[in-house]
Amino acid sequence: MGRTMQQDQVSWNEWAPKIIAQYNLKKTGANHYNGPCPQCIGTDRFYISEKSGAVRFNCNQGCEFKDLVQTMRDDGAWPEFNKDTAPLRPTVLNNNPFKHELPGKLYHEIKGVQLHGAEIVGDTIKIKIGRADKKPAGHQIIYPNSSKRFSKDIKVDGAFAVLGGLVEGVTYLCEGWATAASVTEATGRPAVFCLNAGNLPKVAEILKETKPNATLIVAADHDEAGIKAAKATGLPYKMPNAFKNDWNDVHKIKGLDAVKIGLETSLLSTIFTPDNCDLVLKNNYLLKGWLGRGQMSVLYGPSNVGKSFVALDMAWSIASGTEWHGARCKGGPVLYLATEGGGTFKHRVYAIKTRRDDKDVPLYVRPSPVDLLRPDADLDELIQLCDEIKTQTGENCSAMVVDTVSRAMAGGNENGPEDMTAFIANIDALRAATGAHCMLVHHSGKDLAAGARGHSSLRAATDTEIELEVSKEDNLRFARATKQRDMATGAEFAFTLKVVDLGLDEDMDMVTTCIIERAEGDVVADAKKKPITQNGKILIECFTQMQGEKIGKPNSGGDGWPDIGTRWVIETDKIREKFFGKINTENKRSTYLRAVESLKNAGHLAQNNDHFWLTAKKYKIKQV
């Protein structure tokens, strides 16, 4: 996401020409230029654009804002500011307390690591970088304030530096230099400085080929980019437990022993063999048959089917620890991100509260927009919010509801792999940092049979899919678990939306909302019958009109009949005659026979001897 300085301090007209000339940027749009990044030298990763007369810039590889600014200042392409004219900096939440300059100390001293061959040049350290063929690639300069700069001639892709020896035996791959330093000091094993997250998978591929006998393990940073890079290598990886931490952070906070233990915990402990395959019969669920603890689910359906009401109803049961319409619950605090609905969401919560006996339910509703597409937007705030909920309740959040996906990735392309996988990565980061199950409320696509809309990566990453649909015949709604990674599919819940009166507004009009009400028995059975064809509807219309005219009679008893006097029956010949009068086709007989057969096969019509009757509950009559 581009960052912008104040217009009156870094104007487009004054500074854009200098930046364009310095970095040989190419025009790609109106007041929009692309080219190699001044910081990481990545081709076409860097862009500048104009916004309200000010310079806006970014590196798509994720270079730090402050590092880019420092590099551009050093190159004379960005202004220096004194304290009186310093621009407003963007606010970035940062849980890492060790990325700030300490007066009088160099970068490696601030990080608490040794030099490992790096040179001290003035107040900076200079790290030599090479390639697999042992030829030099260039160097990186790191300032005390953590800003970094590569030499201009360097080609980053595939370049690296090795700390602590040669690449042999167990060797760790790291994004940052300080991380590599901490890892080699803690383990006594070589650590490869891969320059950045984007370059780490490339270095991994090179080392797999050139060092086939080495045991490569990624010492990953615990953030979105770090997890993505580690997974892309195909290698085993270990990362700190705390989100937004790397292994140098663990070193600074807990010491080198904690780094050693964290990295050297045997990877064999994550697998099992037939000899140590013990049964685990304890079910790790939130809602049995529906939601698993710590997983990701998608609850989807067409507009106005009641998605938010179902999600809130589930969230209440999880937060209160009570059964959800017969499904057992192992709950805890819930954070509900109500990105749409505004103040009316209070009405929904109030309606549930007044109809249940639960007290002090730890359901926390955040009724405002949220951005889970861009990791530098709301991710840290949500993690912090979960931490505060834990402090208040003494428990981790058991579930988080994102209502809806489209609002949480506003501005992104749901059908594009880049945006959808970025969104999923942020959801994964939330789950990793909080341990919470993440339920995503989403819409169906245009083709209802195709499931939730958007790129297929969403379904691939989902542990549970819950589909909502509505019966057009009687407006009854169904929730069905159509995909379960670790549980049996097939769970089903039938419900209606019951309108609840809340009170009168200032105009004396009733304010209402809805709650979920479970449906059972014949009503559900009728709604699950197959849809009625157009000609079938005509035949039913014939039947109901004739019944209204008292043509026919209540059924008699005996074999093949319903309970005596409970159904209105009409002779088949009279129904056929009525039906012929309502249709205008060449072959009325075959049209009639197909309509009868479709209704009987779908369970809407029954016949005994030469009489028909309708089977739905609403067509029952009182016994005479």
Image (cartoon, rainbow, N blue to C red):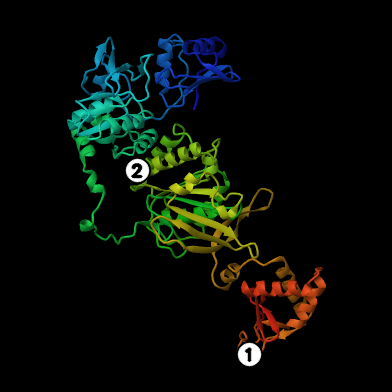
Q: Amino acid at mark 2?
A: Thr
Image coordinates for residue 362, horizontal then vertical, percent: 41, 50
**203 or 244: which is nearer to us?**
203
User: Is the residue marked by circle 2 packed among few (<14), some (14-19), or many (20+) residues within 10 Å?
Assistant: few
Image coordinates for residue 526, horizontal then vertical, percent: 60, 71
Q: Amino acid at mark 1?
A: Gly
The residue depicted at 60 percent of the width and 69 percent of the height is 529
In the rendered structure, which disc, 1 or 2, sits on the residue that comes first in sequence?
2
Q: Which type of secondary structure does the marked residue at label 2 adopt?
A: helix
**241 or 158: which is nearer to us?**
158
Label number found at residue 391: 2
Quarter of the image that includes the C terminus: bottom right
Image coordinates for residue 109, horizontal then vertical, percent: 24, 20
Q: Is residue 325 left or right of residue 118?
A: right
**485 or 590: which is nearer to us?**
590
Identify residue for label 1: 557
Q: Which type of secondary structure does the marked residue at label 1 adopt?
A: loop
Q: Is residue 348 left or right of residue 151?
A: right
Residue 290, quarter of picture:
bottom left
Query: Would residue 318 be visible to someone looking at this image?
Result: yes
| Foreground label between 1 and 2 | 1
Q: Is the residue 535 above or below the residue 174 in the image?
A: below
- Number of numbered callouts drawn: 2
Q: Is residue 443 left or right of residue 166?
A: right
**Alpha carbon distance from label 1 to label 2:** 68 Å
Residue 227, quarter of picture:
top left
Q: Is residue 526 left or right of residue 209?
A: right
Disc 1 + disc 2, Cβ < 8 Å? no
The residue depicted at 28 percent of the width and 59 percent of the height is 280
Q: Is the residue 604 above or below the residue 41 in the image?
A: below
